Amino acid sequence: MILNKEIGLKRAAGALLLSALLASPVLAQTNTNVSYSDIVGYQTKSIPAGLNSLGLPLLNSDIAKTTAGTLSSASLPLTGETNFGSKLAATEPYYLEVYSGDLKGDRFDVDVTATKTAGNGNVVLSTNSVNNTIALSSVGTALNGATVAVRQHITIEQFASMASTPLVKTDSLASSDAIGLVEGGALIYYNYRSDGSWRRVGDSSNYAKKPVPPGVGILLKKASGSSTSITQSGLVRDNDFARPYVSGLQLHAAAFPLDATPSNLGVTPGSGATDWTGGTTATGDSFSVVDGGALVRYVLRTDGSVVRPGSSTNFLGTSLFDSSSARLIKRSKGNSDAVEVDPIGN
């Protein structure tokens, strides 16, 4: 099945064509009588020993989906709610996604403690989360009357529960399974310890509740001699998706259960402040995908081709990115305003 839709640029000029294949078995379930349910589905990926990448494009269920009122400081009224904090678990992370209006596709993390303390019909948004797609201070009145949804983040702990056989936990860094995320431009691994905690090297904190933000995915180092499969189930996003790029290294994955080529993602060199940068093997923007347990790098050249170093083959139109995988991206210039438009057309 091929879906065609444009990828737009919100708060920036330009539009690109998205033409991609459904990457994995995603099953729609609907009510055939009067109304229709959300589209739900699943995807399964085999995980051998060694380095793997995973995309998690499906969503946890909405805690609430309603109309927002006037943002005051970081507090946002939700129509129909009286004690919204009572719906949130104190130890779980949540985010709000905007479904209409000028900020359609943007996302903000929830300040769970403040929301529960407020004890009213408001959700309190985090003012400084690195997962926010725009600064909360710049929102103004843009959320007034917008449809918004609040849902729980996928966490490292939840990801581990998707495995068909338990992930390997030991107190040895060399023999335990480990999850990698890019933070502040660096790749950070969290190892699965024998007590069931997830820890960074040199840090005794348990990061089991750490969010895997939408559209990010993970790298998974699977212990030698072990294998499993990962099955994710959930809702298919039916909304635009804000896709900020930063200057430097970042980990991205599909927001929709769709394969994509570099061309689909608008990888075209340009001289503008937010354009992709073409160049040599050393200077061009690049993608790295996991292939056969190793990271394979592709570079954007000045002529617009996407090549593997040492090869002249142009991969611009090749489906390098499947929805069950993640990709490391290194860009010279950021673009905080990029938005992928809903391919279903909502």
Image (spheres, rainbow, N blue to C red):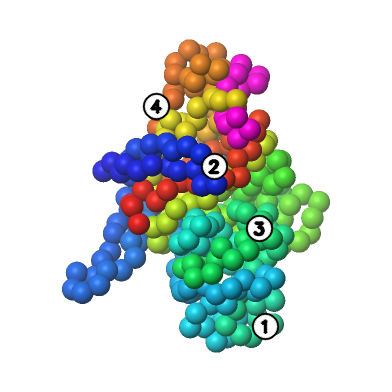
Q: Is residue 213 visible?
A: yes
Inspect the image, locate mark 4, and give the three-letter code of the amino acid beneath it. Gly
Identify which residue, 223 or 219, lies in the foreground: 219
Report crowding for label 1: few under 14, some 14 to 19, many 20 or more residues within 10 A (C-alpha): some
Above or below for 254 versus 38: above
Identify which residue, 171 or 30, lies in the foreground: 30
Q: At numbered mark 1, what does the secondary structure look like: helix, strand or loop?
A: helix
Between disc 1 and disc 2, the foreground one is 2
Q: Which residue is mark 3?
A: 138
Residue at mark 4 to residue at mark 3: CA–CA distance: 37 Å
Report crowding for label 4: few under 14, some 14 to 19, many 20 or more residues within 10 A (C-alpha): few
Pointers 1 and 4 in contact (CB under 8 A)? no
Pointers 4 and 3 in contact (CB under 8 A)? no
Residue at mark 1 to residue at mark 4: CA–CA distance: 51 Å
Between disc 4 and disc 3, the foreground one is 3
Inspect the image, locate mark 1, and give the three-letter code of the amino acid beneath it. Ala
Residue at mark 1 to residue at mark 2: CA–CA distance: 36 Å
Q: Which residues are magenta?
A: 272-285
Q: Which residue is mark 4?
A: 317
Question: Horizontal and vertical percent for residue 229?
Answer: 45, 50
Between disc 1 and disc 4, the foreground one is 1
**Mark before the other along the chain sequence, 1 or 4:** 1
Residue 118, which numbered label? 1
Above or below for 95 versus 304: below
Q: Which residue is mark 2?
A: 12
Q: Which residue sits at x=71%, y=49%? A: 172
Between disc 2 and disc 4, the foreground one is 2
Q: Which residue sits at x=44%, y=38%? A: 15
**Mark before the other along the chain sequence, 1 or 2:** 2
Residue 6, which numbered label? none
Residue found at the far right of this picture: 202
Residue at mark 2 to residue at mark 4: CA–CA distance: 24 Å
